[in-house]
Image (spheres, rainbow, N blue to C red):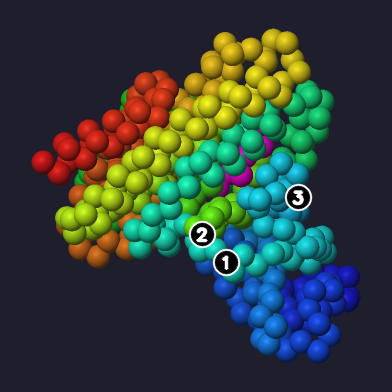
Amino acid sequence: MGSGKYEKLTEISVIGYVREKLDFFPLNARLSAKEIGDGNLNFVYRVKDEEGGKSVIVKQSDEFARSTPEYHLTKDRSRIETEILEYQAGLVPEHVPQVFLYDEIMCCCIMEDLVQYRILRSELTLHKIYPDFAEQMAKFLSVMLICTSDAVMDSEEKKKLVKKFINPELCRISEDLVFTDPYTNAGGTNDVFPPMRMFVEEEIYGDKLLHTEVSKLYMEFKTNTQSLLHGDLHSGSVFINEDNIKIFDPEFAFYGPAGYDVGNVIGNLLLSWGAAVYVMEDGSEKEQFLSWIKETVEKLVIRFMEESRRLIIESSRDPLCNTPDFAFWYVEKIVQESAGFAGLEIIRRIVGEAHVKDVTGIEDPQKRIQAEKMLLRMGKILIGQRGEFICGKRFAQLMEGICRSDTD
Ligand code: SR1
Ligand code: MG
């Protein structure tokens, strides 16, 4: 560790590493370590004082993706992840884990262990309800996406950030796995549930109009350096409890279209909702959960729009941008694109390589087929008709309408 060279940590060596790097645990503490990472890219260790109970997280990157070793990546993603967490801490400190140390040589970030929180995706698969999620997430998204954009920032400062967060390799993963592969299976990486093959052939691979709309969003993703994005804001990147949310794992961060982050949040809520429609027994628990997700999507959009407009009008020093008319136009466009990106997220999580357990966890194959078909139809509407999605109500109408037509 002291050799000044990169070394892959283990459950044994990480203990000495943390002691050496961080003055966090008492000298006589009995430390234990466990690798707890379940993501696709990195190795994550929890180092814990067995008596005192305090713990930290050590996240280390390697030159390949953990789930897919053929993806060769620079370890620079640790630097990007640390720097965006530090930048976010300046804007929304209550919604990100605290970084204690970044080690450039070991490509390690040591950070706060959010032991009081649970992963949102796991909570959604248990059909737990969090009444404040929409408000909390709308605040995180509006502050991060508006305050890092040209609508509010000084032009030169913003361009320095664009440069700092250039993230070509991780963007390439998204370009392949979100935009191209699900529609063409070009990389041969798609993983379609076998009984769904025919449906996917016809409705996804065979729909040329859909491909054209996807290509427009693909170009937005590649060329629109609008806001500093988290870049992978699915429900597995959100910690939650009754009081708060914390957003973590921002290694895909880059300057891209603001609607990408908003769309990922909406898309993942819809994936949970679509699975619950078929998996939950009819009754009040199901009604409450489905209503909560629908109201959450609607409220998230409403509050994101209100807060984003307020931030632009109050914070922009540019006389051409700090007007209600500009703010209205700017935010509405983000929401329309969010609908398209939400549709892309839904489709790629069903057709592509990286699935979500909300859907793969549906044990009954017939129910999984029904859920996947409904979600794919929904994804197509979100992409193809994204121009109509200019308010929260439109998202709620989509959920009501598609549910009626699929379950009647
Ligand atoms: C090989 S990486 C696969 C997926 O995991 C990440 O969380 C991103 O969502 C990526 O697309
Ligand atoms: Mg991740």
**Where is mark 2, residue-wise?**
241
Is 373 one of the magenta-colored residues? no
Residue 382 visible in the current orientation: no
The residue drawn where x is 57% and y is 11% is: 325
Name the one closer to the observer, 112 or 94: 94
Counting other residues with Cα less than 10 Å from the Cα at mark 1, is it few (<14), some (14-19), or many (20 or more)?
few
**Where is mark 3, residue-wise?**
86
Name the kind of residue labelled 1 in the image.
Gln
Q: Secondary structure at mark 2?
A: loop
Counting other residues with Cα less than 10 Å from the Cα at mark 2, is it few (<14), some (14-19), or many (20 or more)?
some
Quick one: label 2 or label 3, which is nearer the N terminus? 3
Asked whether the beta carbons under mark 3 and mark 1 sit within 8 Å of each other, the answer is no
Q: Label 2 vs label 1: CA separation?
A: 7 Å
Left or right for 28, reference 389: right
Q: Secondary structure at mark 3?
A: helix
Q: Residue 4: image x %, image y %?
A: 88, 70
Name the kind of residue labelled 2 in the image.
Asn
Instruction: Read off the magenta span.
Output: 223-232
Is 228 one of the magenta-colored residues? yes
Q: Secondary structure at mark 1?
A: loop
Name the kind of residue labelled 3 in the image.
Glu
The residue sitting at the left extreme is 408
Counting other residues with Cα less than 10 Å from the Cα at mark 3, is it few (<14), some (14-19), or many (20 or more)?
some
Left or right for 57, reference 282: right
Q: Residue 383: image x %, image y %?
A: 38, 30
Mark carried by residue 116: 1
Quick one: label 3 or label 1, which is nearer the N terminus? 3
Q: Label 2 vs label 3: CA separation?
A: 22 Å
Asked whether the beta carbons under mark 2 and mark 1 sit within 8 Å of each other, the answer is yes
